[in-house]
Image (tube, rainbow, N blue to C red):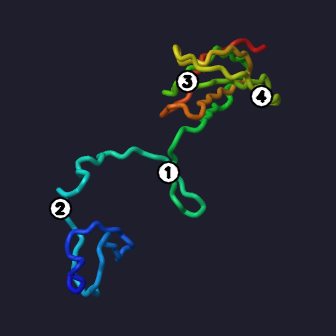
Amino acid sequence: MAGTTEANGSWPFTVIDATHIDLVGSVFTHAYVSGGKIGGSLDAMVLSLDSYATAVQPQIAQFNSSNVLGFLSGPTLEATIQSSEQGTDGLRLTLRGFRVITDSPTVFGSVSYRDTQGAPPIVGSEVPMSTRTGRCDMMRDSRYQRYSIRIPAGANWTFCAGYEPDVTTNGTQ
């Protein structure tokens, strides 16, 4: 560098903004005139460029009202997945349970049901998924049914594709 020759050499630096840096630990006694460069040997890097992953793990992110991007990370929150209401043309449905398609070790299932479109749905009790079969076993006979899956907060899981109901149709009573 011309002028401030005490800045010549190797210094750790901090970027201040797009056109300014701070040479950490340096003391200037002369005014800067011109010149200088920032650089160094790739071999002197602490971390090898071969150590960086070639693929990126996708993450979910969102912007807040101040246009600040935030990534959703940390422990999992509770997840609830609910089907649309199932029914047939006048026939009753008998549910024996449903198999949950997920890698979560902890899942709870329930069914809400009714016999007429005008009646409010009745929500059945939650049952835990069997770790042996992956099913939420329950019995329910009605005209209309809706299935719910709940994965509790903190459970270790990566996907839930839904459920596979075990249902048969009955008469019209």
Badge 4, how many Cα within 10 Å: few under 14, some, many 20+? some
- Which label lies toward us, 3 or 1? 1
Q: Residue at x 54, y 31 (%)?
A: 155
Q: Give the CA distance from mark 3 to mark 1.
A: 28 Å
Question: Of the numbered discs in the image, which one, if any, rests on residue 71?
Answer: 1
Asked which secondary structure carries label 3, the reply is strand
Circle 2 is placed at which residue position? Answer: 41
Amino acid residing under circle 2? Ser
Circle nearer the N terminus (2, 4): 2
Q: Residue at x 78, y 22 (%)?
A: 115
Circle 3 is placed at which residue position? Answer: 100
Q: Position of residue 163 (x, y in %)?
A: 56, 25
Q: Quadrant of the C terminus?
A: top right
Circle nearer the N terminus (1, 2): 2
Q: Are marks 2 and 3 in contact (CB under 8 Å)?
A: no
Q: Quadrant of the N terminus?
A: bottom left
Amino acid residing under circle 1? Phe
- 156 relative to 7 in the view: left or right: right
